[in-house]
Every structure is written in C-alpha cells, then in structure tokens.
Image: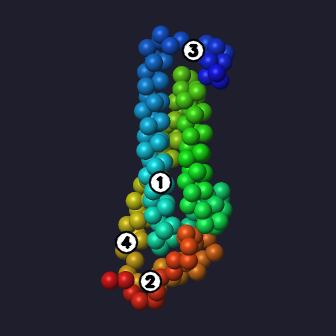
Amino acid sequence: MLERYLESRLHVDLACPSTRARCRRVLLLVALIAILSVGDLLVTLTMLNSLGMEEVNPFAAFIIRQQSPLGLVLFKVGSVLGCVSIILVVRHRRQGEVAAWIAAGILTVLTVRWSAYTSEVANFNSTITIGEAQRSQFWLTFGNRRLESAPLP
C-alpha cells in the first residue's frame, strides 16, 4: 500500500529502461546487503561465544550485555529488514540506489574489517594478550568466558 502511494506521488515510469535497470541494480545490492549482514551476524555470534569482542554499536552492545543472543539476532534482522524495506520502496529513484550503494559499501568495509580482526585474533600467541583485552569494560562475551592463563598452543 505504501509503495503504491509513493509510486503515484513520485510518478515512476516503469516502462523506462533506465528505471528498470536501476531497479535491477538496487535488487542486486539488496541481495548483497542481506548476504553481508548474515555474515556479520554469524561472525559476531561466533566471536561473542568464544573469545569475545568490543561492539561499537551501542544498541547491540546493550543487548549483548543482557546476555541475549536471540535479542541480538532479532535486533540485527529487524534493522536490516527495516533498511532493506525502505530501500526497496524507493528503489525506482536515484536516492534509493544511492542508499543501497552506501549500505552495501558500509557492509563491505565491515566484512574486510572482520577479516582483518579474525586474522589478528588467530595470531594471538598467548592468553595474556586476550586477558588484557577481557579486562576492558568494553569487552563483551555471551556468558563468563574467560581464558586460563596458560599460553595457547
């Protein structure tokens, strides 16, 4: 209903080849956004269930501090669905495509950062480094997962 209203207000010409091409590009970007978001959620859950991590999103950090993996999943899915829904409603307009490119770009940078982070964590040579990180008030885990003081193999 909202989409029909917006289309009537925005006078979208779906017969125009450039409009149809924009819609296709936006749909592909939305698929990329969904895939990268699922990857972000899986890596986040993996890190929170193992060594832990710092979360820069204050809403997600609040949910993690409540020890609620389900809450985190619902928050992530809800925020991505909200973003994607808005983009899909305005997919015919230039602003919709720009928003899709920005969201896909942010998630791509986040994916690259996750790759670097997981490589750094894999190179920790002792639990002393991890223990120092875990003493930070910003370090989050699900449960009381603290490593012993013995070095990693």
- Mark in the foreground, 1 or 3: 1
Decide which of tag 3 and tag 4 comes sooner along the chain.
Answer: 3
User: Marks 2 and 4: CB-CB under 8 Å?
Assistant: no
Amino acid at pointer 3 = Val
Residue at the spot of label 3 = 12
Q: Quadrant of the C terminus?
A: bottom left
Residue at the spot of label 4 = 122
Q: Quadrant of the N terminus?
A: top right
Q: Residues within 10 Å of mark 4 (few under 14, many from 20)?
A: few
Residue 115 lies, in percent from the top left, at: 40, 59
Decide which of tag 2 and tag 4 comes sooner along the chain.
Answer: 4
Q: Residue at x 45, y 18 (%)?
A: 20
Residue at the spot of label 2 = 127
Q: Quadrant of residue 87?
A: top right
User: Marks 1 and 3: CB-CB under 8 Å?
Assistant: no
Q: Can residue 10 be seen here?
A: no
Amino acid at pointer 2 = Thr
State how far apart marks 2 and 4 are (Cα).
Answer: 12 Å
Q: Residues within 10 Å of mark 2 (few under 14, many from 20)?
A: some
Decide which of tag 1 and tag 2 comes sooner along the chain.
Answer: 1
Q: Nearer the viewer, residue 141 or 94?
A: 141
State how far apart marks 3 and 4 are (Cα).
Answer: 51 Å
Secondary-structure class at tag 2: helix
